[in-house]
Image (cartoon, grey):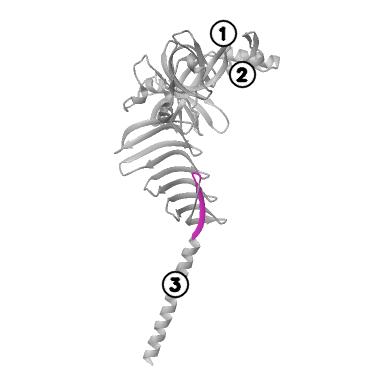
Amino acid sequence: MKKRILIGVCLTGLAVFGIAVVQERYAIAEKQHELIVKWDGTEYQGLYEGDVKNAFPEGVGTFVSKDEKITYEGNWKKGKFSGEGTLIYEDGTKESGQFVKGKRNGEFKKQLSDSEYEITNYSNNVTYGVLYKYRNDKLEKKDYYYGGNLVSSILQNAKELSLSEIVNQEIEDLVCFQSVVSRISQLEESCILLLENSDGSSFIIEYSNNETKKSKQPYIPNVKEGDLIELYGYYDGEDTYAVVNDPQYYGGIYPKIRPVWAAVLEEEKDVRSKKEEQKEYSDILENPYLYTGEMRQFELVVDDVIYLDTNGKYYCKAHSIQSEEEIYYIKKTGEKTLLRGMTLSVSGKIIGQYKELQNVENYLKDRAYQNEIKEPIKEIYKKVINDKEQIVNDEDICYEYKIYPLIIVGE
């Protein structure tokens, strides 16, 4: 009788254990889902384990592809990488940063080995700005991105040509040459340089020189008239140089170069091979785009505040506590009311420069006249160039600006 009872207890125990095992396996199966993830143009089949909402990964979870080529650990939204996350590749390389709708956005750290890693910035999965390469936590090398490609690689394909040779090239050919800055025209969103060569021939370049353009920001220093520069860029046909509101205004049709990189040669320094050390304010002021995305801590005194809208967006003009000559513009969103003379401690990224309008009276006078005659301002200014009347665009109206480094906080 005792044996039968003992056997019955054992069988009951095994049955309960079996049910527990089945339930555990069922629970694991409920947590794991087969999933197809598209990443960098390739589809990966694999298993997802983590939070789910409406049958899609949402919250925190992990995806491992069946071929184990990629693993993602982090946040999800509507079935896509979204939020903080880490990608691990089959060779052990790790990428960590912020994802938005399945794309890299913001600063990313790529761990190549125990001692090597890279820091760069992304916008919708496209690299931009500066690439920092570290070894044993020491900055070893910098490179730069233009249109998602490394500038060092782009420049290797440039043709060293004279201007007369350049105009015979196909449009979009990458060229390289030296020239002297003859004239500088600062516009609201960009800058036009008229460059002259030793043979008397001239050409123009136009480029954005305010807040950094993420995809194709040319790396051009803030030059002065008379500077000898080395320029790399793409031949872009011919264009009219017609900038108005200028006491020495003149115009003409010139060959045009769409620039990628330039360096001032007369100063006998090449920023590409410059040793990495603490940057002085003057370096950032001269070459703001070489520091795009660089994070810094600033201790400042508020000089002025320009509020942009009711949501608290503003530009703040401020100088360093150490020197009143070190002036920055801060771009920020916040509810805090700022007053002149207030001290400000901020951590932010360099994102190009701010162009502060100087001859405000001329600017307001033009805008008032524009409102009075009810016509676009471009209709006000006309010039006969090569026997043809040229009408310039609003953005081609030239005023005087002072230029300061621009810092963004909170993005």
Region in magenta: 32-41
Q: Position of residue 224 (x, y in %)?
A: 44, 13
Residue receiving disc 2? 394
Circle 3/circle 1 CB separation < 8 Å:
no
Q: Position of residue 50 (x, y in %)?
A: 47, 56
Which amino acid lies under the numbered mark 3 shown in the image of this protein? Ala
Determine which quarter of the picture holds residue 325: top left
Q: Position of residue 221 (x, y in %)?
A: 43, 20
The residue lying at 37 percent from left, 14 percent from top is 266
* Dot 3 alpha-carbon crowd within 10 angstroms: few under 14, some 14 to 19, many 20 or more: few
Residue receiving disc 3? 20
Q: Which mark is residue 288?
A: none
**From what the image shows, is residue 74 above or below residue 11?**
above
Element under label 3? helix
Residue 85 appears anywhere in the view: yes
Which amino acid lies under the numbered mark 2 shown in the image of this protein? Asp
Which amino acid lies under the numbered mark 1 shown in the image of this protein? Tyr
Residue at the extreme left of the image, as rendered: 136
Q: Nearer the viewer, residue 97 or 308?
A: 97
* Mark closer to the chain start, 2 or 1: 1
Q: Any magenta on residue 42?
A: no
Circle 3/circle 2 CB separation < 8 Å:
no
* Mark closer to the chain start, 3 or 2: 3
Residue at the extreme right of the image, as rendered: 374
Q: Nearer the viewer's eye, disc 3 or disc 1?
A: 1
Residue receiving disc 1? 250
